[in-house]
Image (cartoon, rainbow, N blue to C red):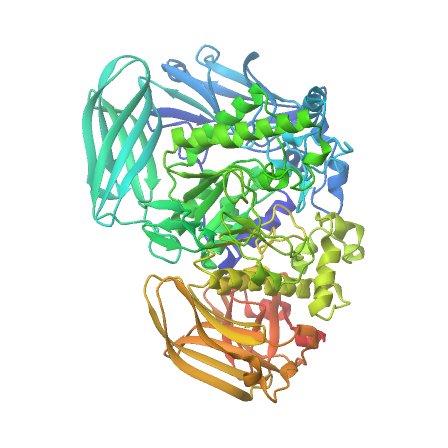
Amino acid sequence: MNRFDRTRRLILQAAGAQALLGVSGLSSPAFARDGALRPAHGQTVMPIKAGWTFRKVGDAAWMPATVPGTVHTDLLAAGVIEDPFFRTNERNQQWIDKVDWEYRTTFHVDVGLAAKDRIELAFAGIDTYADVYLNEAHILSADNMFRTWDVDIKHHVRVGENVLRVLFRSPIREGQRLLAAKGYNPPSPNDQSEVGGLGEARVGLFTRKAGYHYGWDWGPRFVTSGLWRRVELRAWDMVRIRDVQILQSAVWQDRAQLDVIVSLDSEDARTVELTIASPTDATLTARRAVKLHPGGNRLEARLTIDKPRLWWSNGLGEAHLYTIRTTILSEGVETASHEVRIGLRSLRVVRKPDAQGAGFHIELNGVPVFMKGANYIPNDSFLPRVTPDAYAAVVRSAADSHMNMLRVWGGGVYEDDHFYDLCDENGILVWQDFMFACAMYPGDAGFLESVRQEAVDNVRRLRNHACIAVWCGNNEIDSAWQNDVPTGGWGWKQRYNDAQKAELWRAYEAIFHEILPAVIAEQDKGRFYWPSSPQADWKVHADVTRPAQAGDIHYWDVWWGQKPFSEYRANIGRFMSEYGFQSFPAFETVATYTIKEDRDIFSEVMQAHQRSSIGNATIKTYMERDYTVPADFKSFLYVGQVLQAEGIKIAMEAHRIRMPFCMGSLFWQINDCWPVASWSSIDYYGRWKAQQYFARKAFAPVLVSPQIVDGVLNVHAVNDRLSAQHLSLDLRVATFEGDVLWKHAAPVTLAANSSQILFSRSIDALAAGVDTRRALLLARLSDGAKAISENLLYFHPVKELHLPSGAPLVSTRKTDDGIRLRLHADRLIKNLYLQAEGVPGAFSDNFFDLLPGETVQVDFRGHGITEAAFAAAFAMSSLGKLQ
């Protein structure tokens, strides 16, 4: 583990509220953590992870390698290359993807293992073009990063030492060959071919490989190769269970009916006993004798559960999971078994026509649920580096921020099982894209069959997860092409002749209107499939300007269109599946990839860590509109995060108060794959930006949201809970020094699962005679003395406010898991930013407004911290100090 990896791991482990502490490393259930061979589920499974070496093809010297891993990370560990993320190192490492690489290892097979009826090598992920040799016999050619590859090696393996060798062909050279055969380059604007030294030759779309590896507008270009997921030798006798599918045929409050479909292989004809039971529920059981024939077998059984414990999304109830164990006994001896966890729930996507178009919402257990969350990208440019801690940090952060959905975006990967397990456990629904984004793809028979096999592999792997809510064909391709509007789209069609356009659209229809929905119908019957995001309907592109809205919307006129944040209130669709604004990460993160001379937002290095074409200048432009732009670099980073958070807060609240017209708000994006200026709310190291703290408040189950529209103050309240809430509403206009100039109080009842207006009045009636540059409006919903939701409204942009410049009084004390701070202010402190640079840990709240006369408690969570070390590192900033 190099310095870079150690730093990230320490930060993730110490992230307190922003990471799940104490999570152990992820190991495959098929083998022990020490890599020892052992029987599992009726098979003998041996990981092939030790003793790997690698070299550039043609070189004499072999270097140590890690599997799972990548060429880039192995070169880094060997000292051949420097940290790829530091400064502009990315540029001088583009040679790596243009040469071939070779990996090899040996493994031992004893007599007992060699005598098994069946022996196979199982590759969970090969990236991407590879030829595999066992004892110099060619056993596999792979060409799809997203597929699994199981190879029968019974007749190739030998007792004693066996040599396994994998030859990786350059994905760039393979892409160039396919481009030349195509004769023209289909659109793929996010492929940063210029960075890769290819000019305008965009070759990534020809290869079934993570699109973001070729670069994106938030990510670098590192086109990896390697065995990126585990390699195992599996051996068994008689019977092997290949797969168990749990179909939830009917789920009601009082009863659930499950159909269990078991796929297994048998070496001969035999009668066995099939047993299905649950270690978590003794009443769930089924047993019967079945006759097997040689080869593949499909067995079915039905289970009924009385008074089931339902699975609920985060915030609505327990995300209860049942374990289902399937066992095969032959002559009374267990020969194979399989376990799966499921959550019992009914889930459907409802698209009901209404007077405003057609709705688009998730109905869970009969309840329409507003989706609150974010888009999710891969956690690293080098996927094998993503640890269980990293997965836990992002999923736990989503849950802690009251999110109930993450969208796994189509330019990344179908994520590791551990990610979906965490989503199951935390009640986070997943909008799952297939891995296609912002490009037109080939339509030849070989490519289409590879896509079909990829879809089958991943749908089978993920279909039992309670979290899977939506299968979506692709990201933004329908919007970019707009086949329903001859002159529409992003200008792609205009670059091609009629024959090329017809060919590209035939390929699109084959993949997204034929192959993928057919795989869903066959492998995951009943699950909702949506061809593209955004889309109004099948073959009808999304358009937020239409008076009648349907489907989902990606709204980017804020940022790309340079429109003000207020436009978020005017442009709302039925389900907002993308929108966002950029910020820089914290200074501590910037310091990991810069040196002192780089620390200007327009320096070469800072621009290299900004992939949006309008990037850093756009952040500054928006900042100039509403804030005093700091000259100091660290202060600029801080104000940039406040700018992002306040802007996206407008969107999150605007979407929620429009329910049930709008029933989803997923901002772009929750995480990063490297340290960078981006749309993320959590940076690469797991540090929460201001936006993530704001999201936790904007997505709370009960929200009060004051809005001024056309001179009228409307105070909205949203209640996501499934019961009415009887609360007190408190409104007041007060000066920054705490003098109350106007107030209103009243009991209110918030209907279950609703949005409503609690108060409406002309702003002139509230602010008459008030210097609104020195005043704010406070809206608070309370249950007795307990504040349930609180929100502030300012009457002018921040740069026009006369903000106090003082600092709060601070006292601290040591706690079991860190430091507890008590903060008190005599005057308003706007967007108080708490820092403890160099001390591992995280604040439970940050970037908040501290009101005059208010005392708040904030925890800094991190084990092993002394008060002295914390005090030495502790610092505070606020907007008032910068004016």
In the image: residue 554, left or right of residue 520: right
| Figure label count | 0
Q: Quadrant of the C terminus?
A: bottom right
Q: Position of residue 302 (x, y in %)?
A: 23, 33
Q: Name the residue rendered at 20%, 36% in the picture.
A: 285
In the image: residue 288, left or right of residue 560: left
Q: Say above or below: 158 vs 63.
A: above
* Along the viewing direction, whichever of 738 and 796 lies nearer the viewer: 796
Classify residue 830 by image quadrant. bottom right
Q: Say above or below: 359 vs 805.
A: above
* Along the viewing direction, whichever of 317 and 781 lies nearer the viewer: 781
Q: Position of residue 478 (x, y in %)?
A: 58, 39
Q: Say above or below: 785 vs 293.
A: below
Q: Position of residue 718 (x, y in %)?
A: 43, 66
Q: Name the residue rendered at 76%, 50% in the picture.
A: 607
Q: Is residue 163 visible?
A: yes
Q: Is residue 824 visible?
A: no
Q: Name the residue rendered at 26%, 25% in the picture.
A: 328
In the image: residue 513, left or right of residue 185: left
